Image (tube, rainbow, N blue to C red):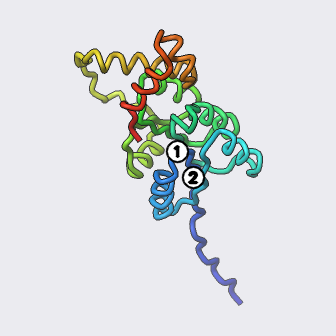
Amino acid sequence: MSNPSPTPSAPAPRQLLIVEDDDAFARTLTRSFERRGYQVLRAASLDEVQALLRDAPAPGPAAYAVVDLKLAGGASGLACVQALHAHHPQMLIVVLTGYASIATAVEAIKLGARHYLAKPANTDDIEAAFARGQGDAEVEVTERVTTSIKTLEWEHIHETLAATDFNISETARRLGMHRRTLARKLEKQRIK
């Protein structure tokens, strides 16, 4: 009597954590990744990420993570990147942001992110970022385009925001402007 051949098992679903406080955007990303075979968990804050890490079996709640840089209340997604990487160093983390800057990109990578993408980014862009393990020496090096004073001001504001861990009051103090003036400028530049 011959042993029946084992039935091929379905591949294990890829597990993804989405850290995003914009519920509509998080739902859209969730549906898109679920259609691609991912099991998706969601968190909207550092506290929710830490609860997931506490409750998940080792090595962690997921092998992949998409983290929004700016969370509700001015909280920084960089703290989430740091917590996720500390708990599961092999997790592939992609940071998404509508507030892209060199300073936050560098910090995200130093804290454990695999890649940093400016919004709008779609599921294809995010999956491509997960797959990119090495840097690309063939990327074209271009001259910095002369920018307007408004653009330079925005870059300076964003660098200061990143340096203060997105604390609006401290950023306003360091920039020597009223907090409400800074809030208005940030609202004009908001990209979500």
Q: Which mark is residue 16?
A: 2
Residue for point 67% across, 40% down: 88
Q: Amino acid at mark 1?
A: Val
Is 36 displayed left or right of 64 in the figure?
A: left
Quarter of the figure that contains the N terminus = bottom right
Q: Quadrant of residue 38?
A: bottom right
Residue for point 56% across, 38% down: 72
Q: Amino acid at mark 2?
A: Leu
User: Label 2: how many residues lie within 10 Å, few (<14), some (14-19) or many (20+)?
Assistant: many
x, y percent for residue 69: 51, 35
Give the answer, above or below, for where 53 lies relative to 167.
below
Which callout, 2 or 1, points at the residue further toward the start of the chain?
A: 2
For label 1, the residue is 66
Give the answer, above or below, for where 164 lies relative to 130.
above
Q: Which mark is residue 127?
A: none
Residue 112 seen in render: no
x, y percent for residue 39: 58, 60
Q: Secondary structure at mark 1?
A: strand
Residue for point 47% across, 21% down: 103
In the image, farthest residue toward the bottom: 1
Q: CA distance from mark 2 to mark 1?
A: 8 Å
User: Label 1: how many residues lie within 10 Å, few (<14), some (14-19) or many (20+)?
Assistant: many
x, y percent for residue 176: 48, 9
